[in-house]
Image: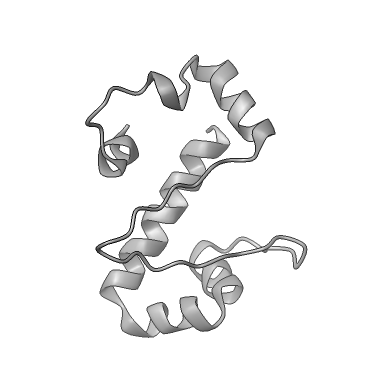
Amino acid sequence: MEKSRLKKQIERRLVGKALQDDTFRRLLYNNPRLAIELETGVYIPPSLKIKLLEEEPQTIYVVVPAKSLQQNEYEKTGTRLLDIPEGISNFDLMKV
């Protein structure tokens, strides 16, 4: 499985659990590394930064991947962000 698809699956799993389980949500805020490790069973080295961000209704977030990740994804799919049709939401992109 390609890294970007696996990453999206893990993110969905974490978000889903945080929405259903307040204890997990608090752990995710207080110790995201431990929460992710417990939920996925995957060790996360201290050298890997984890930034947790809670969305706000009146804010749009744009996550720009590292240039090397962006290039790799383009080479695999042939799709760049500018190639995505107007009117497609983040939710629509997550379903892809």
The residue that appears at 50% across and 42% down in the rendered structure is 6
Q: Is residue 13 above or below residue 79?
A: below
Residue 31 image point, x, y percent: 57, 80
User: Is residue 31 found left or right of 91 in the rendered image?
Assistant: right
Residue 76 image point, x, y percent: 55, 18
Nearer to me, 3 or 40: 3
Nearer to me, 61 or 93: 61
Q: Is residue 1 above or below residue 9?
A: above
The residue that appears at 67% across and 63% down in the rendered structure is 49
Q: Residue furthest left?
A: 87
Quadrant occupied by the C terminus: top left
Total number of numbered discs in the rendering: 0
Q: Quadrant of residue 22?
A: bottom left
The residue that appears at 25% across and 63% down in the rendered structure is 57
Q: Quadrant of residue 23?
A: bottom left
User: Is residue 72 found left or right of 29 in the rendered image?
Assistant: right
Q: Residue furthest front?
A: 58
Nearer to me, 62 or 9: 62
User: Is residue 38 found left or right of 47 in the rendered image?
Assistant: left
The residue that appears at 35% across and 64% down in the rendered structure is 55
Residue 11 image point, x, y percent: 43, 55
Residue 41 image point, x, y percent: 57, 64
What is the image's colouring?
one colour
